[in-house]
C-alpha cells in the first residue's frame, strides 16, 4: 500500500487516527511490509524497539563468551574461523541497531539502556565458556536455536528488521555448521575430547531451550507480536521445532542430550522432553547468573575505552563533509 494511503509520518495522528490504524491493520493482514515513514501504532513501534534492541544487545554481548577462546584456539584454522564468527556478531549488532534507529530511537540511547541494565540481552550469554568444546556447543546449540527463532523474522511485518534478518540468518547458518563440525571432530577424537564435547552439550542444552522465552502462557509479548506479524510462531512452537531438529543431529554426533524424559511421541509426531527450569531462567534474567556482572562490566569498559575512536570518526566525517562542500563551492564559483 502506498505511503500516502497509510498516512506517512510514523505515529503522527493528523485527525484521523482510526483510519490510519485501519490502513495499518489491513496492510499487516495483507502481508505487506510496514516501512519507517508509514503510520504505525505507538505500541507497535515500542514493541519493535524493545525486540530489536534486545536482539542487537545480544549480538554484541554474545561476542564475549567466544572471544574468550580466540587466543587459545588449538590451530590457526580454528582461530581464523572463530575470528570471522565474532566479527560477524559485531556486524549483526550494527545491522540491528541501524534497524532500530529507523524507528526514531538513537543508538546512544539504546546503548545507555543496555549499560544501565534498563534493557536486556539473551540470558544465554551469562554462562561461562569453560572449555574449547563450549565454542562448538555454542555454535551448534545456541546459534542453532537462534536460526530456529530468527528465520521466521525474515518475514517480519517491519521492513528494515526483516531485511536485516536475511543476511544475519545466512551468517548464523555458517556459525551453526562450524559448531557442529567442531563437536564432530571432538566426538570422534580421543576419549578425553569426546568427554569434553559431551560435558559442553550437557551444560548448554537447557539454557539453549530457554532462549525461546517463557512458556506461551507466561509470555507477556508473544500474542500481540504474532497478531502484528512481528513474530510468526509462538515460543513453545519454536522450542519444539528446535528439539525435533537436535535429536537426530545429536545421534549423528555420537553425543547424548541430557534429558532422561526425551523420547519420540508417535501420537504427537514430536519429541517429548522434560521440564525446563524456569526458576533458573528468571534468576539469570534478574542478573543473578554466573557471568551477568562480568559481561556488563566488560561491555561498559569497552564502550568507555572506545570513546576516542567514535570521536575521531565523527571528526573525520565532519571534516570530510566540509571538504566536499568546499569543493562544490569552488567548482560552482558561488558561496
Image: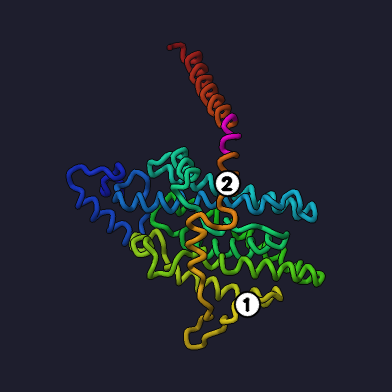
**x and y, in percent, of residue 164 in the image:** 49, 51
Tag count: 2
Instruction: Compare residues 228 and 108 and report the one nearer the observer.
Output: 108
From this view, report whether residue 334 is shown above or below residue 233: above
Q: Is residue 293 left or right of residue 73?
A: left
For the point 40% across and 69% down, the residue is 216
Q: Earlier in the sequence, mark 2 or mark 1?
A: 2
Classified by dominant secondary structure, the portion drawn in magenta counts as helix
Distance (Cα) linking label 2 and label 1: 31 Å
Of residues 243 and 193, the one drawn nearer to the viewer in this rendering: 193
Specify the farthest residue to the left. 15
Q: Which residues are magenta?
A: 302-308
Q: Which mark is residue 179?
A: none
Q: Quadrant of the C terminus?
A: top left
Q: Position of residue 52 (x, y in %)?
A: 45, 51
Q: Residue at x 34, y 59 (%)?
A: 228
Q: Magenta includes 275?
A: no
Dot 1 falls on a residue whose secondary structure is: helix
Could you say which is closer to the camera, residue 3 or residue 229? 229
Residue 74 shows in this picture: yes
Q: Position of residue 170 (x, y in %)?
A: 58, 57
Mark 1 sits on what residue? 248
The residue furthest right is 190
Q: Which residue is mark 2?
A: 91
Mark 2 residue crowding within 10 angstroms, few (<14) / some (14–19) / many (20+):
some
Other-residue count near label 1 (Cα within 10 Å), few / some / many at <14 / 14–19 / ≥20: few
Callout 2 secondary element: helix
Q: Position of residue 251 (x, y in %)?
A: 67, 77
Amino acid at each position: 500500500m502506498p505511503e500516502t494511503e497509510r498516512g506517512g509520518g510514523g505515529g503522527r495522528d493528523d485527525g484521523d487516527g482510526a483510519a490510519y490504524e485501519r490502513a495499518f491493520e489491513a496492510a499487516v493482514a495483507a502481508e505487506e511490509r510496514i516501512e519507517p515513514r508509514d503510520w504505525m501504532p505507538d505500541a507497535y513501534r515500542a514493541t519493535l524497539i524493545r525486540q530489536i534492541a534486545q536482539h542487537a544487545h545480544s549480538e554484541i554481548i554474545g561476542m564475549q563468551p567466544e572471544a574468550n577462546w580466540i587466543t587459545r584456539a588449538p590451530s590457526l584454522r580454528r582461530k581464523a574461523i572463530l575470528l570471522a564468527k565474532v566479527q560477524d556478531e559485531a556486524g549483526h549488532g550494527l545491522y540491528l541497531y541501524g534497524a532500530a534507529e529507523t524507528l526514531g530511537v538513537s543508538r546512544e540511547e539504546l546503548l545507555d539502556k543496555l549499560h544501565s541494565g534498563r534493557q536486556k540481552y539473551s540470558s544465554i550469554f551469562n554462562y561461562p565458556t569453560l572449555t574449547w568444546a563450549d565454542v562448538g556447543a555454542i555454535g551448534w546449540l545456541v546459534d542453532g536455536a537462534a536460526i530456529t527463532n530468527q528465520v521466521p523474522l525474515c518475514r517480519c511485518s517491519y521492513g528494515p528488521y526483516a531485511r536485516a534478518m536475511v543476511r544475519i540468518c545466512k551468517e548464523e547458518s555458517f556459525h551453526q555448521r562450524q559448531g557442529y563440525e567442531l563437536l564432530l571432530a571432538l566426538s570422534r577424537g580421543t576419549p578425553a575430547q569426546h568427554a569434553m564435547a559431551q560435558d559442553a552439550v550437557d551444560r548448554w542444552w537447557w539454557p539453549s531451550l530457554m532462549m525461546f522465552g517463557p512458556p506461551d502462557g507466561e509470555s507477556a509479548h508473544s500474542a500481540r507480536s504474532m497478531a502484528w506479524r512481528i513474530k510468526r510462531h509462538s515460543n513453545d512452537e519454536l522450542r519444539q521445532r528446535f528439539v525435533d531438529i537436535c535429536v537426530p543431529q545429536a545421534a549423528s554426533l555420537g553425543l547424548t542430550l541430557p534429558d532422561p524424559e526425551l523420547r519420540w511421541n508417535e501420537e504427537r509426531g514430536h519429541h517429548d522432553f522434560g521440564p525446563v527450569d524456569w526458576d533458573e531462567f528468571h534468576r539469570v534474567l534478574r542478573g543473578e547468573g554466573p557471568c551477568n556482572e562480568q559481561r556488563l562490566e566488560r561491555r561498559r569498559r569497552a564502550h568507555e575505552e572506545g570513546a576516542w575512536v567514535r570521536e575521531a570518526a565523527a571528526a573525520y566525517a565532519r571534516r570530510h563533509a566540509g571538504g566536499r562542500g568546499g569543493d562544490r563551492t569552488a567548482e560552482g564559483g558561488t558561496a
